[in-house]
Amino acid sequence: MHTRKSLISRRQWLKHASSAAAATTLFPVVAYAVPPHRKFLAAAARIDITPQSLPIPVSGNITAQLADKVSDPLHVRALLLDNGEAKLAFAVVDSLFMDQAMIDRAKKIASERTGISPAQMMVSATHAHSAPPVVGVHGSIALPEYREFLTERIADSIIEAAKRWQPAQIGWASGQCTEFIHCRRWVMKPGTAFTIPFTDKPSNLAQMNPGNENPNRICQTGPIDSALPLLAVKTTDGKPLGALSVRHGHYAGAPGISADKYGVFATELGRRLDAGNSFVGILACGTLGDSNCIDFSTPKRQFDYKQVGERLARAAEEAWRSVDWQTWAPISANNSEMKLNVRMPSAGETRAAEEFLKDTVGDRPIRNWEENYARETALLSRLPAHRILPHQVIRIGEMAITTSPCEVFGSTGLKWQRNSPFSMQMNIGLANGYAGYLPPPDEHALGGYSTWRARSSCLEESAEIQTTEEIMRLLGILKDHA
């Protein structure tokens, strides 16, 4: 465990790391020779997935929550690429997260109708906490009817886009947005960090979201990534067609049913580019495991989700203006699956949790953190002792896209970028499945939410190391075959 002296040194290092991450990066301009008789094609579509019946449960809370209004619509947004040698399909969903079985079924349906291989498709969730649940975790219970509806609509987004192929140009750039991005985990004075029974962390030094005026804060636990990488597509006559970007931080927070900052980004970027209704702007979630929009070193929160989305769109527009457009680019994808162990509760821990639930909760809904983690312990004990993680890396020209089904921490994402053989990289989280948080070993040592054992955080403590090795291996293969 870290001492206070080492934590202060860590804070100084974090300041340096965050400054380095925010520096402008220049990428080499590469002009690709167009293979004979090959044209670059692209297509985009968006499909409405807003629930029609209210009130309806929304995801992402420790206790069950209902939404009785629609603040703004939910969508699946799809972007397809075809260079004459390979095809790629991206679909980003306004949802908290989706499991692999659901995503695989959507890919299968879309593949049968479009001919695009499921291995060349990437489907991810934005991690909006204002959408109906399709996977059960904490206070959210999956809604079977909405899950079925959403599965079909994901497939529909790719199918609909595949009807709209047109000659296109492509490019990539890296923007920056240092506003509204902060590490949400703080090292606390000894004995003051929020601690919950029925987790595998009996003592904690770290606390998530400690509050803006908490006097027990010492320093944030990790660096953040303020980069805003952008994949840009326009028609050959110059009309903006679509864009894919990521934000390395949690949702901003929106009332009712809402696409949160992700929906605002999509609309605002199209407006800024004067792109028209056919333009599909996409903001995916990146390495968000330990970051969000809130600066807890200030007296109070001073923003809403619309401000965040608009600011990100402005940064993306600036990146768009710097793109060096290509009439053709190599594209490819590489996939693998990895089996990882789960931190299963012991028989004694399971028995204690079940007895607590029987004596204290009974049949009523969960009301607090302690009851929630007792329930998570009981539920986790009935699940398999391992999880299968799908990994996918994608190459588009000089940009690599790495994906993970996890909520990856900022330090991990920066490590992947630093060691990547490609000159530019985009990291997309909650992609092609869901496997919970992926804390590095040193974050496990600090404890706190996102390390606490639950269905949302159950992978073995070396999982981040093993995942990093696999991502680097896949990137190496992709580069060697370039």
Image: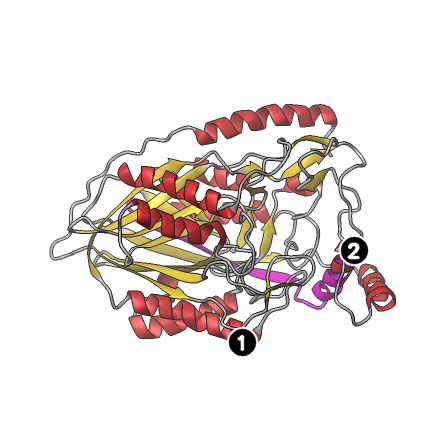
Between 76 and 463, the one nearer to me in the picture: 76
Q: Position of residue 176 (x, y in %)?
A: 41, 35
Residue 480 seen in render: no
Q: Residues within 10 Å of mark 1 (few under 14, many from 20)?
A: few
- Relative to 382, 226 lies left or right: left
Please state which amino acid type lies under the numbered disc 2.
Glu
Query: Which residue is found at the position 43% from the left and 37% from the top?
Result: 227
Colouring scheme, one of rainbow, by chain, secondary structure, one colour: secondary structure
Residue 420 magenta-drawn? no
Q: Earlier in the sequence, mark 1 or mark 2?
A: 1
State how many labels appear. Answer: 2
Query: Which residue is found at the position 51% from the left and 62% from the top?
Result: 70
Q: Position of residue 472 (x, y in %)?
A: 45, 45
Instruction: Report which residue position mark 2 lands on.
Output: 370
Check disc 1 and report its element: helix, strand or loop. helix
- CA gap, disc 1 to disc 2? 30 Å
Between 396 and 324, the one nearer to me in the picture: 324
Please state which amino acid type lies under the numbered disc 1.
Glu
- Relative to 164, 207 lies left or right: right
- Relative to 2, 50 lies left or right: left
Q: Which mark is residue 145?
A: 1
Residue 377 magenta-drawn? yes
The furthest residue to the left: 37
Chain part drawn in magenta: 373-397
